[in-house]
Image (spheres, grey):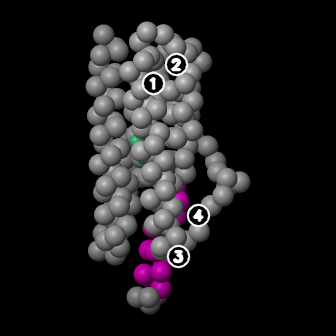
């Protein structure tokens, strides 16, 4: 394989990784909207507020990823290509089950963190601008995870 082909191959892998990350952000937006509205009870308020605040941030992530996909020559997919995967982030059946909602959020943030770490490694030495974007998004997801790990500590008492 020539150096040019190899470069093209990595670029395609990066675009696919960005598309995966894009869908995760979109699905997170869907579920954070649902959970932040569906939860009930006196314990639910701080979680509802935190999640509805994060919706805008996750949507911003999706927009930045879409922009980068395009810059690299890829195409941002439409909704027919969407496949849901966030099993543990579905709104809890019991609308007062705040703990399982918190655990679902931690799972989703960890999944995002794993994806961005993978992309950061893939971009190393090849695509510094995408790497930089993924580092910024990783920082945000680690912040979110930290916040919800803190919530879990309190709610499990
Ligand atoms: Fe995000
Ligand atoms: Fe997040």
Question: In the current view of this chain or complex, which residue is farthest to the right?
Answer: 80
Residue carrying label 1 = 48
Q: Earlier in the sequence, mark 1 or mark 3?
A: 1
Q: Are marks 4 and 3 in contact (CB under 8 Å)?
A: no
Name the image quarter holding residue 57. Answer: top left
Tell me which numbered mark, 1 or 4, is placed earlier along the sequence.
1
The reply to whether the C-beta atoms of the residues labelled 2 and 3 are less than 8 Å apart is no
Q: Percent position (x, y) of residue 37? A: 55, 24
Q: Which sits earlier in the primary sequence, circle 2 or circle 1?
A: 2
Q: Which of marks 1 and 4 is in front?
A: 1
Q: Which of marks 2 and 4 is nearer the N terminus?
A: 2
Relative to residue 136, is residue 76 drawn left or right?
right
Magenta segment, which residues? 5-20
Within 10 Å of the Cα at label 1, are there few (<14), some (14-19), or many (20+) other Cα atoms? many
Query: Residue under circle 2?
Result: 39
Q: Nearer the viewer, residue 110 or 42?
A: 42
Residue ID for mark 3:
73
Q: Mark 4 points at which residue?
A: 76
Q: In which quarter of the view is residue 148 placed?
A: top left
Q: Mark 1 and mark 2 in contact (Cβ < 8 Å)?
A: yes
At 34% from the left and 70% from the top, the residue drawn is 129
């Amino acid at each position: 394989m020539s150096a040019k082909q190899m470069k093209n191959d990595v670029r395609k892998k990066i675009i696919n990784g960005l598309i995966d990350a894009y869908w995760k952000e979109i699905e997170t937006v869907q579920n954070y909207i649902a959970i932040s509205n569906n939860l009930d009870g006196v314990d639910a308020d701080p979680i509802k507020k935190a999640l509805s605040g994060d919706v805008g941030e996750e949507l911003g992530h999706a927009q930045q990823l879409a922009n980068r996909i395009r810059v690299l020559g890829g195409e941002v997919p439409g909704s027919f290509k969407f496949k849901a995967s966030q099993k543990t982030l579905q709104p809890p059946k019991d609308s007062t089950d705040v703990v399982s909602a918190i655990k679902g959020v931690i799972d989703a943030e960890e999944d995002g963190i794993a994806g961005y770490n993978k992309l950061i490694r893939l971009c190393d030495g090849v695509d510094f601008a995408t790497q930089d974007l993924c580092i910024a998004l990783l920082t945000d997801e680690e912040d979110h995870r930290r916040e919800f790990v803190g919530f879990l500590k309190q709610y499990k008492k």
